[in-house]
Amino acid sequence: MSDSHQNAPRESVQESLKRVVELLHKHELVESLVNKQDMPRHDLVQQLVHKQNLAELQNTLDALHPADVAYILEALPLDQRLVVWELVRADRDGDILLEVSDAVRESLIATMDTAELRAAAEQLDTDEIADLAADLPREVIEELFKSLDKEEQAQLQSALSYSEGTVGSLMDFDMVTIREDISLEQVLADLRKLGELPSHTDKLFVVDNKEKLRGILPLKRLLLHNPEALVSAAMSDVPVVFNGNDKASDAASAFERYDLVTAPVVNSYNKLVGRLTVDEVMDFIREEAESDVLAMAGLREEEDMFASVWKSMQNRWTWLAINLVTAFIASRVIGVFEGSIEKIVALAALMPIVAGIGGNSGNQTITMIVRGLALGQIHPSSMRKLFIKEIGVSLVNGLIWGSILGLLAYALYQNAALGAVMTGAMILNLLLAASMGVFIPLAMHKFGRDPAVGSSVLITAVTDSGGFFIFLGLATLFLL
Amino acid sequence: MSDSHQNAPRESVQESLKRVVELLHKHELVESLVNKQDMPRHDLVQQLVHKQNLAELQNTLDALHPADVAYILEALPLDQRLVVWELVRADRDGDILLEVSDAVRESLIATMDTAELRAAAEQLDTDEIADLAADLPREVIEELFKSLDKEEQAQLQSALSYSEGTVGSLMDFDMVTIREDISLEQVLADLRKLGELPSHTDKLFVVDNKEKLRGILPLKRLLLHNPEALVSAAMSDVPVVFNGNDKASDAASAFERYDLVTAPVVNSYNKLVGRLTVDEVMDFIREEAESDVLAMAGLREEEDMFASVWKSMQNRWTWLAINLVTAFIASRVIGVFEGSIEKIVALAALMPIVAGIGGNSGNQTITMIVRGLALGQIHPSSMRKLFIKEIGVSLVNGLIWGSILGLLAYALYQNAALGAVMTGAMILNLLLAASMGVFIPLAMHKFGRDPAVGSSVLITAVTDSGGFFIFLGLATLFLL
């Protein structure tokens, strides 16, 4: 992992993006001229202009931080993206592939042959190779593996052994370890010999001869403490340590709560196996948050903005299919009451209101509960209180909004009984929404499922079908 | 700002929460016994048990990191929360108030008098006082201000002058500054005299005698470089610098992209006014992500899980009211076609399917576009491509799902024309969803509004009313 401050930004990345797009347009203009005129007299001049444009583009790209190049690649439609990707210096390919989103990485890797891929991956640390591994052809991984030394091979195997969402999948191997029986002066001398420290090094890890973690030595203590003191006297206990199999989300919460920059990762025998850094944790938090938002809209994964229609459909169809099923069930509930609707056609116009408001209210409840569960803040003794509160809110809401709607229905159709049915149905559907809004995520949690995924679909299905059933059922009972 | 590693966790915060809840239950049990027996013979024994419980609870709390106490306070119903809050050592009140959510902070501050509040705030740094300022009574702020020295007063004023969502509102004043004409050895000696470095110090800021930022000296360079060298020779250019008025979200992206731990903040004359640290940025990212999720469910702000019914209603009613209006409009669209529904009652059962699938498909499109806009990755030349892609996806989806639904409708009602109308309406409503899904966020962005807020309500309103209108309109044209 190189020093993160190389090629750092003088201008904002949006400005860089604008400049790249301008240069691409110039380039495309010249290309189309050359193509149109089919080997004209001036082609030498035009080829020169052409080359000059590309050279300027290449210089712009070379001056950018890999993360900024990644950002620009993501913002470009596929054809322009590949023009830019061709111009990126080969020794930066690996760093940039690490930074782009999964979908865009796929589109870039598809254009590279095995030799190029191996060259790109060879620039990377073993933990970074592991991050790319899922997208690389098997033969590339195998060849890479052979080219590594023993220690690196062990690291790569270790990194690949942790499944996604664990601390092990986020950790790196750039930890600096020291023994406790040497002086701080000696540590400093050793570090100076090393000449460079890995990025984000805020502490050194003190280990014994079996590499078991004994303590930590914060960099600032190394700076400020008496240089003649021994490490054992200057070091502190390890405040936060993770196991490689711990959930990454728990580690992320710990980083947030205790404001960590790095933390050691050990195996079950307390042997130091890696370290977790705040930059990886921050990326993890952002990705989790994004995938939550995407999942709520029924997008299975992050989608390349310029993906083909076919790829987009694959990403989106599951949710639409599920929704079709729930909508169909709701439609069948209405079907049962077609006789009632035939007699009082106003029911058809009013029923979506009851279902819609129920869905919204249920989603509010479920969002609160899912959040509490995700934070681990809901414990058995508080459940009853939460349930009572949500029932209370929905009862008051039902009385208020139900009455307003009842009056509106009465005003529209001059039918007091219809207004009363409307009010009653609203109250009942909001109560249903509140109880299911508490029950669904708790049940999913109990059965070991992630309540964030699909809760919203389920509650909407319940409040739609339930809303139609309650409203049309009440109407059938009292109005016919 | 104290060293973040104090009172760091030995057990997970969930375990601490469980233990606190158990102790609270014991405490409540004893309390209820004492109350029931109305001064019994054994009251001395019981009071002892009582005291012992509270003492154990207090010890547990004292051993916890402030962030963990905050977490536990958030997870407790109001009555238990206040018991715990009473037991927290007064000198930790300030740190804990900083960590809890806005809603819970309000519930805690409501129980404190001005003297307690002043005492709590006095423990804090000026930038932290500024964070609390909005929740403190005016008189407390004024008294606090008088108790500060000149430099701190200037800092507090500066911190308060930046509006929410700016870099200035997140920065702190714990930067260590040095001059460029001294040797690294001298810097080290000065730091040793200081005895402590602020948390997250990964670099020192090099300023001239007017406090203008000249460069940075990474801590590792201070460690590894030749100690006799001058700061001017060892320092680097400032890779990333923010202005206090920059948007916090842009700074957060920069921290993620360039893997920063700290960055300097300057005013418009390049004078160093503060620094931004990764822990504040991480909190900001988490809060933004949460408020996005809450906003999508129509919760105006983070809600205390155990808020009163009345408070919860205030947080939730806006969205329900807006939704009532859009649902009412959709209902009126149906009202226009009551004559058609009276003749073909199957329309009432089928129409919610068309509206529902349209809403889902539209939300998928809008989520993609809002995300692209938030990242600044959508530029004018790519809009046409995005639009064509979304139209393409919705056309294919319309053909596939529309045909399936058309066949289902035909199977259910033995009416081929009804099936054809169903298919046609699905295709048209999905096209409407795609075009509005692109258009709405772009228009909101153009007029300087945040497209993330309310886009989803708008698209659902359009696809509901639009879906009913298209389906019932086509049916009226072709089936009657």
Image (cartoon, coloured by chain):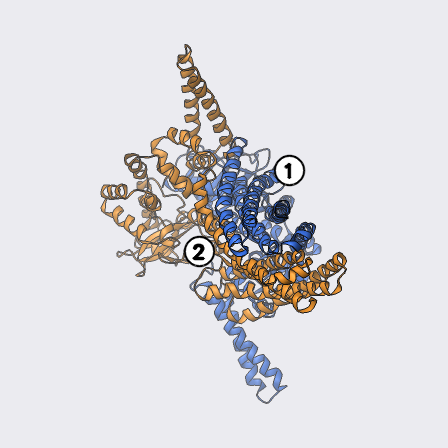
Chain colours: A blue, B orange
Q: Which residue is the site of mark 2?
A: B249
Q: Is residue B53 left or right of residue B175?
A: right
Q: Secondary structure at mark 1?
A: loop
In the rendered image, is residue A226 in sight? Answer: no
In the rendered picture of this protein, how many numbered marks are placed on residues?
A: 2
What element does badge 2 sit on? Answer: helix
The x, y position of residue A341, in whole percent, is: 65, 54
Q: Position of residue A321 (x, y in %)?
A: 68, 55
Q: Residue at x 44, y 58 (%)?
A: B250
Which residue does the numbered mark 1 point to in the structure image? A447
| Screen quadrant of the C terminus of chain B | bottom right
Q: CA separation, marks 1 and 2?
A: 37 Å
| Residue extending furthest toward the bottom | A41
Nearest the viewer among B31 and A347 is A347
- Circle 2: is it few (<14), some (14-19), or many (20+) Cα within 10 Å? some
Relative placement, left or right, of B363 versus A193 is right
Q: Is residue B163 visible?
A: yes
Output the chain of dot 2.
Answer: B
- The answer to whether the residue labelled 1 contacts the one labelled 2, judged by CB atoms less than 8 Å apart, is no
Amino acid type of the residue tagged 2 in the rendering: Ser
Tell me the subunit letter for badge 1.
A
